[in-house]
């Protein structure tokens, strides 16, 4: 067989090993490895549990369960219709498997049905489909008794008592299933098709026809997992097949909603111990929206970020809470003094005229250690407050409507980049807050009470008490209005003017309203001060390099490789990779010293979509011959080798239209 | 002849088939000889299977019915036949036949031998092959061979149920045929009006003096008129067979009688009800088969919730949507117009449909292209063309990362894009094609703010 693909696996050479050792001796590598474990494990756990929680999407599962247990076959029907559920599972096909596995377990547990999952790979035609359906169902061990029964039967089979058995059944004969069913008596046989779009639709139609003709003997129920939309799925099935299937559709929570929730409860929650910076977070969020939608991918990326921080940054040891001065590796002090944030800090100290302190910081490692310890703690608190403020902001914004929705992940990104303080976003929200009516205000308080693990210095309980007292005094059912809300005020006065009997309440109303307005104003000021205090720019903090990880390039190199770009670049400007002297002079131009494939590739780039091989050869020979006067046959050999390489890379193929021509199949930069 | 009362029950059960029932029961009456082979033919849902089964069950002949729909291969059919015949014989005679000799049955010859063996010295046996003309993986000589079984095995009668009897199938003449003609309008209505559905789902309160008998009568009265209306408006042209007609009528029934349930009309106000609900019969929405019942079959007066677009759209990653748009354009635009529509250099991209060049061409050959491109079937395109268009239509450039290629693979595995031809996956010349239509492409484009119609060669009608 022709081998089309090679896996390049270089030996673990000595060079690599020594490199690792060099890092190890740099500064407490094993310490940091341990720290990484401590920091990452809880976060990973949170991501996993949260993602299963969200994806499981219990309401959808419940609905499907209800559908399965409620689907009954109308007994008087001759032509049987198969109850069918269309499960719109979204385009992130990687998560379908786990969803169906969970669904299967739940169906088996909660209903009297049995569950089989079929995938396109095992069902290339109807026969294969039925075969695997039967195999999966009948090979399942129902219990000990069943097993013995089967063994008995097999024995009979062997001991020649065949007369009862008769012709041996094909392994795609549903009569087998009928025998199995008569023993198990399940309520229904749920057949789930995991990746419906990947199936040959004629197979699905045939399956529908076959199963429906068995409906009078076997209680089938179909579930289709659909990645596109139910319309496009149904438009692929024939009308006759559709008429055999009737049921409901179920929507599984969409991947982007899940992601937003997971982001908030994990990376974007206040209580993580290593914060991801704005640039990196934006990269992660965008990647989810633009390219992939997969929680696993997100988890991997965050994990890699943690790894990079702890493995590549010797100073990350400071994040350890228990490490004493003596246990610190020696070279961290000098490294710390070279940090940009250290310099910034020292400069501010100098501006304040605290030169003595600065001197001590530069001279005494011990003093530096104490300061670092102090600043790490205070920095972490500041970060905690900052991220808390983000969640408070998000919570209030959700309640105080009329402001455009901004996802919480983007609030997190803006706050960690220090953009939020005094931003239009905050001002707008504060303005709306000053205008809230009493019922909205009450829900604002409720949502703030519900915020857990966040820094909220405002005493909500006091506000709640005062608000309740005011509401109690309110004689009518309309909520109290804040005076700051001009529009509502005028609206109410017109109503009051119309209804004469209301006018006598007017004095008490306005008195109530003004004390309510006072309350809201106080709350508004508190919130304003709170944001003022907490929304700092974390990158101004001393040691922000350690508190915050915000490097994009390691992540994008690993998670978004550019294979095609790399090949194209290597071929079109080999000097970038070779760094040789001979080619450097002719930057970006052809020269005979370049590798032959690269030369040919550059000629290839210059030509049109159909290339005359002889022309190509002439051009090639001209370049090769220019540098080193190769003999023609040598050059020809090189040419053929280069051409074979291009062909191997899939860049050219023989042209069918013209003899002696090759056609170009790829263009650079796509 | 069967006793009259038995015929009577059959005729009750299957009205409008007196002739066929009479003939069948005359042919398969125990003491008299039956034809060796009989071909029963008729279009879909004309009652062939049900009536043959009904008649054979009423006569006391031993028989077996093999449904080809349930047999996946020819061999499967043979083995099922042997097994069913043995079962039927066992049931009829009351003692078990030793099945050891019948274990294997690979081909038609073996089937003849087995059948001859098991019918040796018995009374007549009727073997029905239902839908044998659509048997999967059938040996080429299946039909003619089965047609001769009756000659080879003396006490066997074969009945073959087919849709259209083609004489070529059987290679012999003189086989008796029994035709089941399609039902006419009146027959269809008569058959279906035998069991009318309920108007009131919940039993009416006893205080209302609306007895079940009365309800029954009303159900029948409204249902049969309703059936006639459905036939004349829709089913006559679109759902002529019994099953299609019935499912259509059932689909429309609930919205139709809703005003009666609400109390707007009495049960006998049929003509006013018809006028009120005429919208139901005008829209052809209900003719589209779908798994999930399209709930609002819009009666024009009621306020229906606007149909939400394909829910998937929120779910695809941003660049996947652009990839889909690019693929759609690559499939529907001719490659030679690409430079016109997608060249970055020409600052004024051709956004207006039918400007400059295409227009002049159209005017030169006025009859050359009448069909808008989006109505044509998609043509295959090489991958690099997709990528080139993709980059041309993107508002901002995107790096050449592997993510883009991964998304193409994902779109391939959910079959929005498919590779055409059986070429090797790594073959350089592989081509792709889209599987979705104009509406979907337009919706996907719109969700990222891309008006795909502006880039479609020749523009879009409407
Ligand atoms: N005359 C009739 N009276 C009552 N019901 C009928 C009559 N004819 C057909 N039906 C009903 O129509 C349905 C389809 O009938 P049946 O399956 O016998 O048709 P068929 O001709 O075998 O169709 P196919 O060619 O698709 O196999 C059955 O539910 C049957 O009860
Ligand atoms: Mg039939």
Image (cartoon, rainbow, N blue to C red):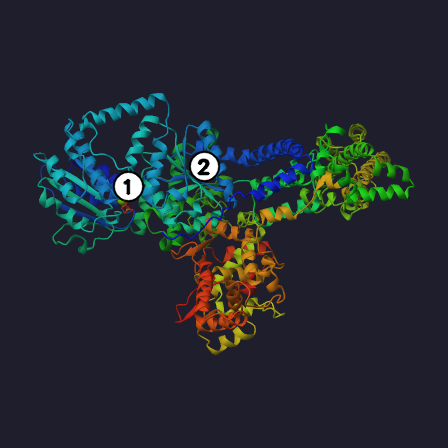
- Disc 2 on helix, strand or loop? loop
- Disc 1 on helix, strand or loop? helix
Point out residue B79 in the picture as x, y percentages from the top left corner.
Answer: 21, 38
Quadrant position of residue A78? top left
Quarter of the rendered structure image containing ligand 2: top left
Judged by depth in the image, the label closer to the viewer, 2 or 1, is 1
Q: Chain of mark 2?
A: B
Asked whether A552 or A631 is in front, the reply is: A631
Asked whether A343 or A328 is in front, the reply is: A328
Quadrant position of residue A126? top left
Q: Is residue A283 left or right of residue B75?
A: right
Label 1 crowd (10 A; few <14 / some 14-19 / many >=20): many
**Looking at the image, is B446 positioned above or below residue A198?**
below
Q: Residue at x 65, y 49 (%)?
A: A553
Farthest residue to the right: give it: A353
Q: Is residue B371 left or right of residue B318?
A: left
Q: Chain of mark 1?
A: B
**Looking at the image, is A460 positioned above or below residue A582?**
above
Q: Is residue B262 among what the camera can see?
A: yes
Asked whether A310 or A535 is in front, the reply is: A310
Q: Is residue B265 among what the camera can see?
A: no
Quarter of the C terminus of chain A within the rendering:
bottom right
Separation of residues labelled 2 and 1 (CA atoms): 39 Å
Q: Is mark 1 within 8 Å of ligand 2?
A: no
Do tags 2 and 1 sit on the same chain?
A: yes
**Mark number, residue B70:** 1
Point out residue A241 in the picture as x, y percentages from the top left corner.
Answer: 37, 46
**Mark number, residue B200:** 2
Of the two numbered discs 2 and 1 on the same chain, state the one appearing first in sequence: 1
């Amino acid at each position: 067989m022709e081998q089309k693909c090679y896996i390049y696996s270089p030996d673990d050479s000595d060079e690599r090993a020594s490199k690792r050792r060099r890092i190890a001796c740099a500064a407490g590598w094993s310490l940091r490895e341990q720290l990484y474990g401590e920091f990452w494990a809880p976060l990973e756990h949170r991501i996993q549990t949260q993602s299963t929680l969200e994806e499981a999407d219990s309401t959808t599962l419940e609905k499907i369960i209800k559908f399965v247990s409620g689907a009954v076959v109308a007994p008087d029907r001759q032509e049987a219709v198969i109850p069918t559920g269309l499960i719109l599972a979204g385009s992130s096909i990687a998560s379908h498997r786990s969803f169906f596995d969970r669904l299967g377990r739940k169906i088996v547990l909660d209903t009297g049905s049995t569950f089989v999952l079929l995938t396109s790979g095992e069902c290339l035609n109807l026969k294969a489909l039925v075969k695997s359906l039967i195999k999966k169902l009948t090979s399942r061990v129902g219990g000990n008794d069943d097993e013995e029964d089967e063994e008995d039967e097999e024995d009979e089979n062997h001991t020649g008592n065949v007369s009862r058995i008769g012709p041996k059944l094909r392994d795609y004969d549903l009569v087998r299933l009928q025998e199995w069913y008569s023993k198990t008596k399940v309520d229904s046989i749920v057949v789930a098709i995991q990746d419906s779009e990947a199936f040959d639709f004629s197979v699905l139609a045939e399956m529908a026809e076959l199963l429906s003709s068995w409906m009078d003997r076997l209680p089938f129920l179909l579930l289709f997992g659909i990645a596109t939309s139910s319309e496009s799925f149904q438009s692929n099935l024939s009308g006759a097949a559709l008429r055999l299937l009737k049921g409901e559709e179920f929507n599984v929570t969409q991947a982007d909603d899940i992601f937003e929730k997971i982001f908030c409860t994990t990376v974007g929650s206040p209580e993580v111990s290593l914060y991801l910076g704005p640039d990196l977070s934006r990269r992660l969020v965008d990647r989810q929206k633009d390219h992939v939608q997969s929680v696993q991918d997100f988890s991997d990326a965050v994990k890699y970020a943690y790894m990079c921080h702890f493995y590549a940054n010797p100073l990350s040891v400071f994040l350890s809470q228990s490490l004493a001065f003596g246990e610190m590796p020696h070279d961290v002090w000098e490294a710390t003094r070279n940090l940009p944030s250290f310099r910034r800090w020292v400069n501010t100290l100098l501006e304040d005229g605290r030169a003595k302190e600065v001197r001590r910081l530069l001279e005494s490692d011990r003093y530096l250690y104490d300061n670092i310890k102090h600043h790490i703690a205070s920095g972490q608190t500041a970060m905690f407050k900052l991220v808390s403020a983000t969640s408070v902001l998000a919570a209030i914004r959700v309640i105080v409507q009329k402001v455009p929705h901004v996802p919480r992940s983007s609030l997190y990104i803006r706050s960690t980049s220090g953009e939020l303080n005094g931003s239009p976003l905050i001002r707008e929200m504060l303005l709306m807050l000053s205008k809230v009516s009493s019922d909205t205000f009450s829900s604002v308080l409720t949502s703030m009470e519900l915020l857990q693990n966040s820094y909220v210095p405002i005493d909500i309980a006091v506000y709640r008490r005062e608000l309740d007292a005011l509401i109690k005094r309110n004689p009518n059912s309309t909520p109290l209005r804040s005076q700051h809300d001009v529009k509502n005020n005028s609206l109410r006065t017109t109503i009051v003017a119309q209804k004469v009997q209301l006018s006598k309440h007017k004095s008490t109303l306005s008195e109530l309203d003004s004390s309510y307005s006072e309350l809201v104003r106080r709350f508004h000021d508190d919130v304003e001060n709170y944001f003022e205090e907490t929304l700092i720019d974390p990158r101004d903090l001393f040691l922000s390099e350690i508190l915050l990880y915000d490097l994009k390039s390691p992540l994008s190199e690993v998670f978004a490789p550019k294979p095609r770009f790399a090949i194209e670049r290597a071929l079109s400007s080999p000097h970038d990779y070779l760094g040789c002297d001979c080619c450097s002079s002719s930057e970006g131009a052809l020269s005979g010293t370049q590798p032959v494939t690269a030369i040919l590739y550059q000629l290839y780039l210059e030509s049109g979509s159909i290339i005359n091989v002889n022309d190509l050869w002439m051009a090639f020979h001209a370049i090769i011959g220019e540098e080193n006067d190769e003999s023609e046959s040598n050059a020809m050999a090189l040419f053929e080798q280069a051409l074979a390489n291009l062909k191997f890379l899939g860049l050219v193929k023989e042209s069918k239209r013209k003899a002696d021509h090759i056609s170009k199949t790829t263009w650079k930069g796509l | 002849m069967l006793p009259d009362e038995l015929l009577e029950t059959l005729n009750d059960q299957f009205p409008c088939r007196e002739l066929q029932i009479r003939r069948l029961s005359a042919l398969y009456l125990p003491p008299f000889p039956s034809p060796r082979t009989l071909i029963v033919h008729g279009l879909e849902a004309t009652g062939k299977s049900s009536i043959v089964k009904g008649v054979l069950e009423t006569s006391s002949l031993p028989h077996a019915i093999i449904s080809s729909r349930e047999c996946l291969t020819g061999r499967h059919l043979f083995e099922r036949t042997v097994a069913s015949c043995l079962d039927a014989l066992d049931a009829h005679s009351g003692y078990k036949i030793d099945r050891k000799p019948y274990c294997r049955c690979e081909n038609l010859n073996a089937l003849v031998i087995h059948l001859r063996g098991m019918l040796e010295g018995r009374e007549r046996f009727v073997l029905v092959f239902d839908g044998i003309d659509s048997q999967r993986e059938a040996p080429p000589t299946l039909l003619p061979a089965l047609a001769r079984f009756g000659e080879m095995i003396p006490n066997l009668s074969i009945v073959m149920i087919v849709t259209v009897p083609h004489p070529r199938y059987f290679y012999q003449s003189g086989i008796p045929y029994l035709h089941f003609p399609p039902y006419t309008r009146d027959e269809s209505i008569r058959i279906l009006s035998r069991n009318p559905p309920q108007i009131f789902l919940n039993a009416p309160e006893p205080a209302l003096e609306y007895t079940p008998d009365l309800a029954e009568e009303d159900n029948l009265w409204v249902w049969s008129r309703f059936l006639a209306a459905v036939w004349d408006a829709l089913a006559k042209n679109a759902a002529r067979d019994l099953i299609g007609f019935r499912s259509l009528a059932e689909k429309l029934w609930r919205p139709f009688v809703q005003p009666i349930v609400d109390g707007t009309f009495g049960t006998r106000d049929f003509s006013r009800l018809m006028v009120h609900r005429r919208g139901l019969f005008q829209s052809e929405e209900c003719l589209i088969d779908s798994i999930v019942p399209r709930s609002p079959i819009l009666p024009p007066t009621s306020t229906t919730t606007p149909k939400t677009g394909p829910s998937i759209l929120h779910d695809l990653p941003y660049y996947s949507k652009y990839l889909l748009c690019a693929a759609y354009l690559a499939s529907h635009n001719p490659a030679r117009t690409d430079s016109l529509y997608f060249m970055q250099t020409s600052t004024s991209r051709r956004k207006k449909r039918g400007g400059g060049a295409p227009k002049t061409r159209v005017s030169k050959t006025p009859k050359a292209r009448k069909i808008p491109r989006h109505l044509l079937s998609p043509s295959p395109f090489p991958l690099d063309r997709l990528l080139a268009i993709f980059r041309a239509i993107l508002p901002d450039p995107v790096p050449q990362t592997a993510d883009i290629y991964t998304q193409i693979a994902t779109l391939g595995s959910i079959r929005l894009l498919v590779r055409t031809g059986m070429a090797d996956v790594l073959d350089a010349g592989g081509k792709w094609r889209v599987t979705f239509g104009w509406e979907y492409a337009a919706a996907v484009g719109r969700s990222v703010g891309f008006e795909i119609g502006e880039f479609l060669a020749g523009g879009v009608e409407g």
